[in-house]
Image (tube, helix red, strand yellow):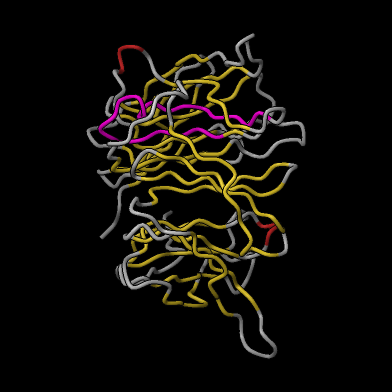
Amino acid sequence: MEKSVATLDKGTTCSSWNYCGQRLATGSEDGTLAIFDSANPASSSFTCSSRSKVHAVSIVKVAWIPPEYGDAVACICADGTLSLWEEIVEDAKPLQWKLCKEFRKNTNQVLDIQFGVSFTGLKLVAAYSDGQVKVYELLDPLELKNWQLQAEFQNVINSVSKFGNAACLSASLSWTPQGGESQQLSFVLGFNSNVAQLNSAKVWEFDQDHQRWLPVAELSLPEDNGEPVYAVAWAPNIGRPYEVIAVATEKGIGIWHIGLNPDLDGRLSVEKVGLLSAKGGKVWQMEWDMSGMTLATVGSESVVRLWQCNLNGAWQEQAAFEPTT
């Protein structure tokens, strides 16, 4: 039986659960950041515990920082501003959300961001409307205001190629879910742009020896012709001898297997094992469950769909949830 867990503010444009699913952050058209909490950890009912005006324009994306670094939320606004807000306690005052970092704004807008954790610390990767990718690293785990730019590049296999006139409408990022200390730091990125070379989803991995980011896999087929990518999602791996990544394009949702062992050129093997129907609408967002076995998708038709792989290796829709009025 369906049950409402929270009533969001009118004009809510985006939302994000924290890593344990016990707090919900939302952004609104008027630039308000709202936090929803549950009075009882065992309850599935959430109420708004704070509202903060963080910008004069609409918030288009919110993302929680990993829990080991405290309670903080990154906000992307419609004018391309990227800022980080932290929940703090001052003397006997109630909890407050305060700005701890505003990343320098340029003429290009931030389209998507994701946090990633490795044994070297916390990273933030941001995709911009000119096709650029910037990776920031936190210098001090106790000071969320101290970030530095670690790398900047474009989402292309040939590092010599540069596309200065790229115009990107959207981008989608997904870090590899946390594993052991020996796990390589990597993420997948795809663009929806006017440059085919930027669009196809690519897996980027940090080369510790040479201190640089390298493309190690491209998740597209020759016949795809660089079609725009609307969403990517990297599945948790709990024992598979390969990684699984979902990529949503105009054709549907591609399910890809990525090998774990690189070849002599440092590239990883890729195989497209499934293509899920888009059901007549573009998919804008995808999330895997904790086991990496169930994929949830939602798009322009506003229907949440759950997908699973059967014992024969075929991907099928398991459930669909339409919005209620």
Assess whether residue 226 is covered by the magenta stretch.
no
Q: Residue at x 64, y 66 (%)?
A: 41
The picture places residue 112, in percent across and down from the top left corner, at 42, 47
Q: Residue at x 58, y 64 (%)?
A: 72
Q: Residue at x 53, y 72 (%)?
A: 99
Assess whether residue 195 is covered by the magenta stretch.
yes
Q: Is residue 183 above or below residue 77?
A: above
Magenta region, mostly helix, strand or loop? strand
User: Which of the 4 image quarters holds residue 15?
Assistant: bottom left
The picture places residue 79, in percent across and down from the top left corner, at 32, 60
The picture places residue 227, in percent across and down from the top left corner, at 29, 25
- The answer to which of 72 and 81 lies nearer the viewer is 81
Screen quadrant of the C terminus: bottom left
Q: Is residue 9 above or below residue 194?
A: below
Q: Residue at x 61, y 35 (%)?
A: 236
- The answer to which of 279 and 183 lies nearer the viewer is 183
- The answer to which of 185 and 286 lies nearer the viewer is 185
Question: Is residue 80 left or right of 139 when viewed as pictured?
Answer: left
Q: How many marks?
A: 0
Q: Is residue 98 above or below residue 266?
A: below
The residue range painted magenta reads 187-207
